Every structure is written in C-alpha cells, then in structure tokens.
Image (cartoon, grey):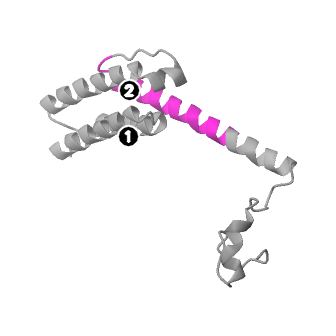
C-alpha cells in the first residue's frame, strides 16, 4: 500500500524553512543547518502532489541561495554553491556540516575539561564574590542554592 499524500506535510516543510530563515537572520548558523536538514529529510520522505513538490523545490532553492550568500555562513564555511533541485546532495552536505560542528563542539568541551583538570578546578564550584553570600548570613540560600558557611 502506497503512503497517502498529506498536504499538511508540505506546509510543515514550508514553516521549517521559514524558521531556518529566521535563524540565519540572527546568525544562528548551526540552528539554521539543523532545521534545514529536518526540512530536507521531510522533503525526501514525504509523498506529495507534483505542484506542492515543485513549489517546495523552488522554496528550497531560494533558501539555499540565501544560505550561500549569508555572511555568517560564508565566514564559517567559505563560498558554497548549491545545485538546484538536488535534495539528496544538499541533505548529505547538511549532515556533513552538522557533524563537523558537533565534532568541534565536542573537542572544545574536552579541551575545556582538560584545562580545568590541569589547573585544579575540576569538581570545584566557581569562585564567588562575598556579596553572593549575603543571604547566608540570615540563614537563607546563596547563589549555590545550599546553606553556605562563608557568611
């Protein structure tokens, strides 16, 4: 049995592209890429009317042009050219960009963790100003949300 055509899915894809544009305008490139990947995956797996598919392909092509022209995207990834109406290639490319960013984030977190361990800060709460402990003096809670002995 073939999957039913659900025109609401085309609307969801359009809304996801709109969200991606908003993220791109705010220079949230990673969020933009995540949303665009979702839209491409949904486009790839959803059965739709030819008219809806044509309109969505046009919208995706236009968004790809906006993404490639975006200052924030170009600063991160350099100049990129997308091929129109090639959902599979665009989806693979988005997955690669997301994977690269996730690896960068993991490496930065690991580096920060090793820096903290090397400086003896591992497991210790950050230093706080005595003003943060004013509530402790009256039996209240300080910024650490536990009764404190500093007051």
Q: Nearer the viewer, residue 133 or 58?
A: 133
Magenta residues: mostly which secondary structure?
A: helix
Q: Secondary structure at mark 2?
A: helix
For the point 73% across and 62% down, the residue is 129
Q: On the image, which quarter does residue 2 sit in? A: top left
For the point 18% across and 28% down, the residue is 55
Q: Are marks 1 and 2 in contact (CB under 8 Å)?
A: no
Crowdedness near tag 1: few (<14), some (14–19) or many (≥20) residues, C-alpha within 10 Å: some
Q: Is residue 35 magenta?
A: no
Q: Give the residue number, with chain letter if any, for mark 2.
A: 88
In the displayed structure, 27 sits above or below 70; it is: below
Which residues make up the magenta segment?
A: 84-107
In the displayed structure, 148 sits above or below 53; it is: below
For the point 68% across and 39% down, the residue is 108
- Where, quadrant-wise, is the C terminus in this rendering? bottom right
Q: Nearer the viewer, residue 19 or 26?
A: 26
Q: Secondary structure at mark 1?
A: helix
Instruction: From the image, state whether disc 1 or disc 2 is nearer to you.
Output: 1
Q: On the image, which quarter does residue 54 sit in? A: top left
Could you tell whether 70 is left or right of 134 in the image?
Answer: left
Q: Give the residue number, with chain letter if any, for mark 1.
A: 38
Q: Where does residue 24 sit, x and y in percent of width and height?
A: 39, 32
Q: Is residue 104 magenta?
A: yes
């Amino acid at each position: 049995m073939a999957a039913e055509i659900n025109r609401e899915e085309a609307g969801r894809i359009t809304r996801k592209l709109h969200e991606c544009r908003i993220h791109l305008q705010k220079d949230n490139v990673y969020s933009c890429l995540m949303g665009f990947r979702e839209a491409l995956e949904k486009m790839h797996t959803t059965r739709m009317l030819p008219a809806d598919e044509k309109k969505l392909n046009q919208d995706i092509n236009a968004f790809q042009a906006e993404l490639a022209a975006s200052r924030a995207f170009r600063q991160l990834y350099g100049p990129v050219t997308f091929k129109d109406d090639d959902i599979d290639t665009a989806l693979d490319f988005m997955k690669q960009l997301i994977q690269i960013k996730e690896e960068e984030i993991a490496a930065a977190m690991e580096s920060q963790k090793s820096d903290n361990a090397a400086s003896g800060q591992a497991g210790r709460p950050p230093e706080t100003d005595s003003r943060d402990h004013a509530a402790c003096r009256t039996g209240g809670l300080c910024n650490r949300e536990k009764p404190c002995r500093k007051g």
